[in-house]
């Protein structure tokens, strides 16, 4: 069992810049992200991560905070939802037709 410390982002604040570790849902591909603008929307960052991992750009992606096991809100600033040093997982969005 690991001793992972979950950092809290104070309510109403935005961490900027952010350093994150991102991987695809399989855990096979990953990338270190440094100096991410914490004011960017999480959905925009998800698209950038997908592009950097050479994943299809015609498919919607979202991010999950790995330590807290929660999906991030695409339309909120990334830095308002996670702290620097967070590991995020890129997850394909499932939509109902």
Image (cartoon, rainbow, N blue to C red):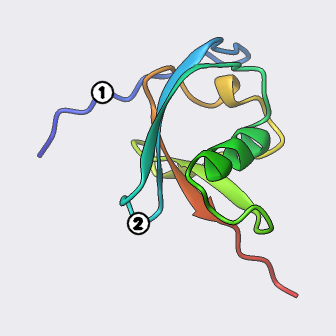
> SS at mark 2?
loop
Pick whichever, 19 or 72, lies toward us.
19
Residue at 71%, 39% in the rendered image:
45
Pick whichever, 31 or 62, lies toward us.
31
Q: Disc 1 designates what residue?
A: 5
Q: Disc 2 designates what residue?
A: 26
The answer to whether any part of residue 13 appears in the image is yes
Tally the marks.
2
Pick whichever, 36 or 73, lies toward us.
36
Q: Residues within 10 Å of mark 2 (few under 14, many from 20)?
A: few
Q: Earlier in the sequence, mark 1 or mark 2?
A: 1
**In what quadrant of the picture does the C terminus appear?**
bottom right
Q: Residues within 10 Å of mark 1 (few under 14, many from 20)?
A: few
Task: Residue 16: give its label.
Answer: none
The answer to whether any part of residue 9 appears in the image is no
Q: Quadrant of residue 32?
A: top left
Residue at 42%, 47% in the rendered image:
30
Residue at 73%, 17% in the rendered image:
12
> SS at mark 1?
loop
Relative height, residue 61 to residue 5 (above, below): below
Q: Nearer the viewer, mark 1 or mark 2?
A: 2
Relative height, residue 5 to residue 26 (above, below): above
Q: Are marks 1 and 2 in contact (CB under 8 Å)?
A: no
Residue 59 coordinates in the image, percent (x, y): 76, 68
Residue 44 coordinates in the image, percent (x, y): 78, 41
Residue 52 coordinates in the image, percent (x, y): 60, 45
**Which residue in the rendered view is the most extreme toward the front?**
54
**Which residue in the rendered view is the most extreme toward the left?**
1
Residue 61 coordinates in the image, percent (x, y): 70, 59
């Amino acid at each position: 069992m690991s001793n992972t410390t979950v950092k809290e982002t104070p309510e109403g604040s935005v961490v900027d810049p952010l350093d994150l570790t991102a991987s695809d849902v399989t855990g096979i591909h990953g990338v270190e992200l440094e100096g991410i603008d914490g004011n960017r929307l999480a959905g925009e960052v998800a698209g950038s991560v997908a592009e950097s991992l050479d994943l299809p750009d015609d498919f919607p992606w979202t991010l999950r905070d790995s330590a807290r096991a929660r999906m991030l809100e695409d339309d909120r600033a990334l830095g308002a939802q996670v702290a620097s040093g967070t590991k995020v997982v890129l997850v394909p969005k499932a939509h109902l037709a």
